[in-house]
Image: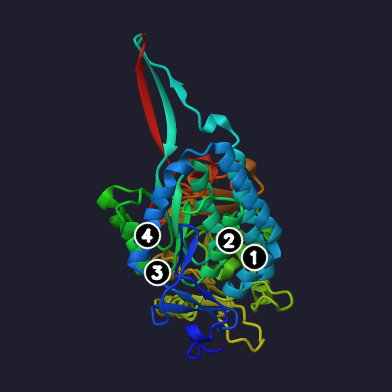
Amino acid sequence: MSTAELSRSTATFVLPAAHIAGQPVRTPADAPGAPIFDASTGAAIGWQEFATAAHVDAAVRAARDAFAGWRDTPPAERGRMLARIAERVEASRDRLAALQMQVSGKPPFEADADVGDVAATFAYYAKLCDDPALFAAEPVALPSDTVTAERFYDSVGVAALVMPWNFPMVTTAWKLAPALAAGCAVVLKPSELTSPTEHALLDIVAEAGVPAGVVNVVNGGADVGAALTAHPLIDKISFTGSTAAGRKVMHAAAVDMKRVTLELGGKSSLIVRDDADLDVAVSLAVAGAFTNAGQMCSATARILVHDSVYRSFMAAFETAVRALVVAPPAAEQVAMGPLISAAQRTRVEAMLQQGIDAGARVAFSGRVADTGSDGFFMAPVVIAEPAADNPLWTDEVFGPVACVKSFRTDDEAIALANDTRYGLVATVVTRDAAIAKQFQQRVRAGLVWINAPQLIYPHVCWGGFGLSGIGRELGVAGLRSYQELRHAMRAID
């Protein structure tokens, strides 16, 4: 069904405007809403109602009402519910992966990996809830014999969780699991491009026994997100999205001094030294630049290659890129899916042209498979030796465009890698463990992989420097980001 033909009345499914205090909230037939598309076909597959400012207010107040009871629920009991969520996600793995493929057009291996990450994240925070030391008061040594002191962590309150569209279900788990573990109640706003995935996860959360009102959902675009982040009863905002949108969130948070975690953009490097295993380097380059069609804040789309192996690397990289099957999820040997929307493809193509007009040279590109699909596909593109001020080198593209530059010394490679206002991740390919350690210490990034793909475990924190955001997600730090550090002092009788 085409976009023009789809309306709420003809949609095969309609998502409610909100879930508040355990109940779906519907809007009138003529109320605002939007179609939901299959990115791999371009077809509209459903409809979503949009929440109003009144719905946002009701959702926040429902979370506020549920907060005290959830905060006072023993951590071990909260953990049991998180464990049940993990188990139900795993049991629904095929269905959830299929939903990701239907909406985002992800290849099967990517969609399945996302669901695995969701289950692992809930399981990890369930286990943390079983560690009494993380929730118990700790004594603080004082230079006094008249008072004692202790420190402890308390739930921050009601959290607004604002999701991106590139890894919707994964990012929801990254935020929701630690928030629930910490004892927070939440209002979650999915991206309007991928909202079915969050609604499916919400059903699982409810089935796991999380009390009504602890998790609430509001659908909509930027106006709904703005109303949520500006609400005076929100204590904490966790936002994943563009740096430009992150600035707006910071402004909204500043009014009431809300706590914020911002996971924003990136312009990350993959560094290939002269002693690198080139097979490994090429594999990491392809995955780092073109997984999820390059729509990753962690995309290592700035590829730095030592001059002595540059020609060999580029020849092997070209072979690999030209061999990528860019197609819908059902295609044989599909390796890369579509961009999320027609607008996103237009934006990336315009940025590519801007870079070419500024002097960038296309070294080679892949192609989109001829499957007859009208999806939002774009062939992967590799730029050779762009100027240091070319926008394709300096700015986040968020699409399947990679740039390759040569270097001659380690110091030059590190300087090039650090010459960015971002600082999220980096990858280094070298056989020298001592040199790898030096790169790990000197490259300004929140996470550095050495000879490894972009493995992400919930035990390891995620976040970066500069325009890549504020704070950390995952790990114990992810739990603490939904808690306030408190102290108490008591006179000794």
* Placement of 368 over or under 60, stated as above or below: below
Dot 3: few (<14), some (14–19), or many (≥20) neighbours within 10 Å?
many
| Of 224 and 335, the residue lying toward us | 224
N-terminal-most mark, 1 or 4: 4
Residue 51 - label: 3
Asked whether disc 1 touches disc 2, contact meaning CB atoms under 8 Å apart, the reply is no
N-terminal-most mark, 1 or 2: 1
| Of 134 and 412, the residue lying toward us | 134
Which x, y percent locates residue 479? 50, 42
Which x, y percent locates residue 91? 71, 58
Q: Disc 4 designates what residue?
A: 58
Answer with left or right where residue 169 lies relative to residue 161. right
Work out which quarter of the rendered image holds the C terminus and state it: top left
Q: Is residue 171 visible?
A: yes
Residue 353 - label: none
The three-letter amino acid code for the residue at tag 2 is Asp
N-terminal-most mark, 1 or 3: 3
Residue placed furthest toward the right: 332
Helix, strand or loop at label 1? It is helix
